[in-house]
Image (cartoon, rainbow, N blue to C red):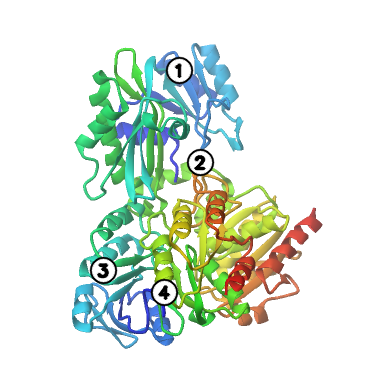
């Protein structure tokens, strides 16, 4: 789960990381109230999960009230790379001399978190890593001990952070690791940390991704989840407990098991179609869950046809067939053609139950996908 | 022959009294797996499907001489259960549980480097040596004994590929699901090395997916160390960056690492043919044999 900037900064500020004075606003009036309290210059920043917000016009600096009104009107409600902006963070402008980078992420290859510090803040750290990797100081962290204070110092000196703020930056890095561990983060970064004219350090942006598998022990973060959701259908999938990703094609895809669902997406593409979504009903799904999955995919107006691909291990073909029958029984007219392929546990029993007046049936994955792609073309 | 498990493997099931643990214990026993004990805190002295239950893994090992465990413990407690198995000194631990917090697994991973135990998973379907034993939730009836080793990050995709192999009359020495999490015990390289050392394994199928760099490392290993031919499949060619595709580990990073393209190129460069469809993978394997 990715937190919005304002949520991440709340978490940082609670832990003692200095952040600029700011207010969250959802209307132009709230923006004007906020700048009235904060003063000028003030940054107005769109709160959506989109990289490169500044370049896309989602961040503007207002120097007076007229500008604040103009930018608030422009940004609130704007479409930023497919996301509608509903909230902005109004933040005191920082008069800065340098921009630094600090962050912690999981190094999958090593199975350990890694702390990173660089003087090249304010730009995409991935491109720094690619072009000038020597400008990033890295310290791998033993998860049994955490980030030792000496490691924070070593990273800061190794990165060449100006000496007069080195202690402050090391302290921010240590705090970030404490948060990384205590909040079950998967990634946490401040880019940039600004060094102000009077040599103070301030977190001017904030990124925090948390481990969805750990939300059960992070009630505060779980509460932020609804506000953090991006897409309406993805929010509905959360409610049903599906692994769901919306894509921009027109062939709806439902299956069991991540690898097999991904493979089904790839085959749709391979046979000339375009996948509309990834939907994994998981292992051992009962009829109701199967019906919910069909409801979800039917609710996506981009979908022209559906392929339902189940290879049962712990999932039973007869339960799946029951769920498909139940879901389709509620319609006078089935909204989109559905192709079903059942294999594995109880697949034969499932095929006997399945109402083949309502769905197309195919025996192999390849045939099922090709039929669904053809159905989508016919529907156009 | 086979790798990691056979009919002599003595299994303790951690979480045997839970719904999943109970159901799959029966399935494993039906398949012929030598399940000798269960371990569930507070349930010592009970019996499940004819198997004696102990409060601790240590108790199960002492009384029943277990040398492997299968973990069906819920995610909040599974990290601790795996630690218990590692610290008891079992030879093999197979963690089926999906949804263990990554930071719990980072600590487990650290401990793994200090002990001799092999961990398979977590978030995996387990391991099966057809006709001998299965540790996990794989449907035993689809596997046939044969000469092909199979290693995969995904369960149901494994079943699909196995069914494509079966159509051609090709069976398996051992099939291993290594799991879909970002941090796992046994890697592709570990499984490939074991298959390479197994005289009965004449070809290997590896099914990878987007996320991480394990497939790239496997490609380098194959080029440098393997005589046994390998055929590959990579799921997730159409996955957009930044989205978790079901598995916690199946994510292409924003900067474009972990893509299907990078993995397919690495495997091809190592001389490994990569099928566009599961059926094509079976075709490649048939050519090897």
Depth check: give the residue in front, B174 or A317. Answer: B174
Residue at (72% x, 70% y) in the render: A359
Image quarter (top left, top right, bottom left or bottom right) of the N terminus of chain B: bottom left
Looking at the rendered structure, whether the residues under marks 1 and 4 are on a common chain is answered as no
Sequence-earlier tag: 2 or 3: 3
Residue with the mark numbered 3:
B85
Residue with the mark numbered 4:
B198
**Image position of A100 (left or right of A79):** left
Q: Nearer the viewer, mark 3 or mark 1?
A: 3
Work out how far the residue at label 1 is from the one at label 4, CA to CA, in angstroms. Answer: 67 Å
Work out how far the residue at label 2 is from the one at label 3, CA to CA, in angstroms. Answer: 36 Å
**Image position of B86 (left or right of A204):** left
Q: Which mark is residue A42?
A: 1
Work out how far the residue at label 3 is from the one at label 1, CA to CA, in angstroms. Answer: 56 Å
Looking at the rendered structure, whether the residues under marks 4 and 3 are on a common chain is answered as yes
Residue at (73% x, 63% y) in the render: A370
Mark 3 closeness class: few <14, some 14–19, many ≥20 residues within 10 Å: many
Residue with the mark numbered 2:
B254
Q: Nearer the viewer, mark 2 or mark 1?
A: 2
Of all residues, the one furthest to the bottom in this rendering is B50
């Amino acid at each position: 789960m990715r937190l919005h900037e304002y949520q991440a900064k709340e978490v940082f500020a609670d832990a003692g990381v200095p952040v600029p004075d700011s207010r969250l606003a959802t209307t132009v009036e709230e923006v004007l109230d906020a700048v009235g309290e904060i003063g000028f210059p003030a940054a107005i920043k769109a709160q959506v999960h989109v990289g490169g917000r500044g370049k896309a016009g989602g961040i503007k600096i207002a120097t007076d009230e007229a500008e604040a009104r103009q930018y608030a009107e422009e940004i609130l409600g704007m479409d930023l790379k497919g996301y509608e902006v509903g909230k902005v963070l109004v933040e005191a402008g920082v008069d800065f001399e340098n921009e630094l980078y600090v962050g912690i992420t999981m190094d999958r290859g090593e199975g350990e978190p890694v702390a990173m510090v660089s003087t090249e803040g304010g730009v995409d750290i991935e491109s720094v890593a690619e072009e000038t990797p020597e400008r990033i100081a890295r310290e791998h962290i033993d998860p049994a001990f955490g980030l030792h204070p000496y490691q924070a110092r070593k990273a800061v000196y190794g990165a060449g952070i100006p000496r007069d703020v080195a202690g402050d930056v090391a302290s921010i890095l240590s705090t970030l690791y404490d948060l990384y561990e205590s909040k079950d983060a998967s990634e946490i970064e401040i880019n940039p940390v600004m060094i102000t004219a009077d040599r103070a350090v301030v977190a001017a942006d904030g990124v925090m991704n948390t481990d969805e598998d750990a939300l059960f022990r992070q009630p505060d973060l779980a509460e932020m989840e609804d506000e953090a959701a991006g897409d309406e259908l993805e929010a509905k999938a959360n409610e049903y407990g599906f692994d769901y990703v919306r894509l921009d094609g027109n062939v709806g895809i439902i299956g069991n098991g991540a690898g097999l669902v991904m493979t089904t997406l790839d085959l749709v593409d391979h046979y000339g179609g375009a996948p509309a979504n990834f939907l994994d009903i998981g292992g051992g799904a009962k009829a109701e869950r199967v019906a919910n999955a069909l409801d979800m995919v039917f609710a996506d107006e981009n979908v022209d046809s559906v392929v339902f691909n189940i290879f049962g291990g712990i999932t039973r073909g007869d339960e799946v067939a029951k769920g498909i029958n139940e879901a389709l029984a509620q319609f006078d007219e089935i909204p989109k053609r559905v192709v079903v392929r059942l294999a594995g546990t109880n697949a034969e029993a499932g095929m006997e139950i399945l109402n083949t007046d309502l769905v197309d049936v195919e025996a192999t994955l390849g045939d099922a996908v090709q039929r669904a792609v053809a159905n989508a073309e016919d529907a156009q | 022959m086979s790798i990691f498990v056979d009919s002599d493997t003595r299994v303790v099931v951690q979480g045997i009294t839970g719904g999943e643990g109970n159901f799959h214990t029966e399935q494993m026993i039906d398949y012929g797996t030598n399940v000798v004990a269960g371990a569930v805190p507070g349930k010592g002295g009970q019996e499940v499907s004819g198997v004696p239950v102990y409060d601790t893994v240590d108790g199960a090992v002492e009384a029943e001489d277990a040398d492997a465990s299968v973990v069906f413990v819920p995610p909040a407690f599974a990290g601790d259960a795996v630690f218990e198995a590692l610290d008891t000194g079992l030879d093999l631990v197979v963690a089926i549980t999906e949804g263990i917090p990554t930071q719990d697994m980072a600590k487990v991973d650290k401990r793994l480097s200090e002990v001799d135990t092999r961990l398979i998973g977590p978030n995996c379907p387990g391991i099966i040596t057809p006709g001998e034993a299965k540790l996990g939730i794989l449907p035993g009836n689809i596997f046939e004994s044969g000469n092909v080793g199979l290693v995969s990050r995904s369960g149901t995709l494994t079943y699909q590929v196995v069914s494509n192999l079966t159509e051609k009359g090709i069976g398996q020495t051992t099939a291993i699901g290594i799991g879909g999490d970002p941090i796992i015990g046994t890697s592709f390289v570990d499984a490939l090395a074991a298959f390479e050392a197994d005289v009965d394994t004449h070809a290997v199928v590896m099914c990878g997916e987007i996320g991480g760099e394990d497939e790239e490392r496997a490609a380098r290993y194959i080029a440098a160390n393997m005589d046994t031919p390998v055929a590959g499949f990579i799921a997730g060619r159409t996955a957009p960056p930044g989205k978790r595709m079901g598995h916690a580990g199946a994510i292409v990073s924003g900067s474009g690492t972990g893509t299907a393209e990078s993995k397919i190129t690495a495997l091809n460069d190592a001389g490994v043919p990569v099928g566009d469809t599961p059926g094509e993978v079976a075709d490649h394997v048939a050519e090897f044999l």
